[in-house]
Image (cartoon, rainbow, N blue to C red):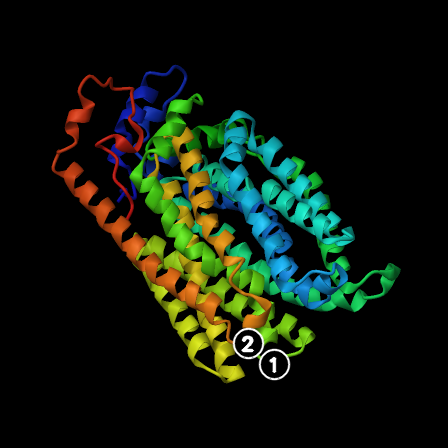
Amino acid sequence: MASEKKDPAFAVLEDSHSKEKDTNYAAFSGSTEDLETAYGVNEKALLRKLDFKLLPALTLLYLLSFLDRSNVGNARLEGLTKDLHMTGNEYLTGLTLYFIGYVLFEIPCNVVLKLTSPKQWLPTLTLAWGVVATLLGVTQNMAGFFAARFFLGMTESGLFPGVVFYLSMWYKREEQHYRISLFFSAASLAGAFGGVLAYGIAKMKGVGGLNGWRWIFILEGIVTVVVSVIAYFFVANYPSTAKFLTKNERDAIQARLASNSDATRDEKFTWGNVRKALSDPKVILYGLGFHTMSLPLYTLSLFLPTIIKNLGYTAAQAQLLTVPPYAVAFILTLTVAVASEKLKIRAPFIMGGASLAAIGYIILLSSTKAGVSYVGTIFAAAGIYPATAIVLSWPANNVSGQTKRATANAMQISIGNLGAVLGTQLYRSDDGPRFFLGHGFALGYLCMNVVVVGTLWAVLRAENTRRDRGERNDRLAGIGEDEWLGDDDPRWRFQT
């Protein structure tokens, strides 16, 4: 794992910086004291400034993204399928089409981000999906619903992997995990808000001659459109051009990153670096780590209102009863993120979360009492969301090379969301109230997650050991002091 002060993997980067004119990055050793001496910048104050400027805006965008993709579950309870004359299985097809669009456009969206800039691309994506989400509220037939869900997935696909890559260009390796987890916690927060908002908005049934489910899509979509326009002004680009920073603060960030990551390197986009990600077995394992978590994640977020309603509650009660599981998930996501960061371990927390969620599904499969089964949904959410947050931050910490990392982040989500594609077909209308097929698949996937993450943990630890012994040093033959081999470089250590 990386040192808290100065990662030896990046000595080469600092060597190269020492040769640049008009910089003094080489004088910075990586310590807080040296940062203040060299640049007159307090590191803790700088981090607080970055957090305040970057995280609320990005977290809001993801909250809206998750709200706009999962509110279909709330809309279903308010008459969506009846008004559009869909059977239960046709409704599931609409959910599947969302993830097909998401998977197909994941990697292309991150390539566009690399070719453009966050300030241009992230708000544009938000505007596009906000318009599509609003149009869901005025669709008149099943074909329109199918088309809107596909385009919603396509337009939302670039946000999460794009933001994960974006944060890696601002924060040191050991600082990214907590920030990504905080960003992802918006998913559980969206679930909690979604239930309350759906309960209230559904009361608008009849206003303008529209059913309540239509207003859920329209109002929540309009909010996204408004926020996207504002986002063009509050999303910053990269540290070197950020206007909210002073010159000393920009230099201090560059020095911090030069001692710890590849974010300060002027790496040009090449398809060769994309191919490196596509052919790396570790990147495939990161993808499978999310794949085995995405099925339970998205089936829970999309079907939780239906699961709870089938326990014997009314639609209104089910909307409100979705709040506690998400509230617990939100608190645990932040708590586990802090613990993982403090202890510098990833895999055990992921496997622990998967195991906790598995207990929830065992309860759901075995109990016939509504109250007990409801407790099972809380266990499921409490394990799924914290584990997913760590899974999604792992490649951002471990993949070096900007283009390779951007591609790896997108690959992870693409491979992962194939699990969601399958999951959307598992909770069929006639399977309630026990939903043996859906709950059984979720339980099986969580067990496989423990196996996949355990395997990846062993692979990364073994590779670190080989590098500690110098068994990979032959890769440095003929390599100049200002050259960097990405995460293939024997000076790089993986976070486990």
Q: Amino acid at mark 1?
A: Gly
Q: Position of residue 96 (x, y in %)?
A: 56, 52
Q: Amino acid at mark 2?
A: Pro
The residue labelled by disc 1 is: 312
Quarter holding the N terminus is top left
Residue sitting at x 48%, y 66%: 438
Eyeballing the image, is 3 above or below 448?
Answer: above
Q: Secondary structure at mark 2?
A: loop
Q: Secondary structure at mark 1?
A: loop
Q: Are marks 2 and 1 in contact (CB under 8 Å)?
A: yes
Q: Position of residue 250 (x, y in %)?
A: 48, 30
Cα gap from disc 2 to disc 1, whole angstroms = 8 Å
Eyeballing the image, is 26 above or below 278?
Answer: above
Question: In the drawing, what numbered circle is on residue 433?
Answer: 2
Q: Position of residue 427 (x, y in %)?
A: 54, 65
Residue sitting at x 21%, y 32%: 490
Residue sitting at x 85%, y 65%: 206
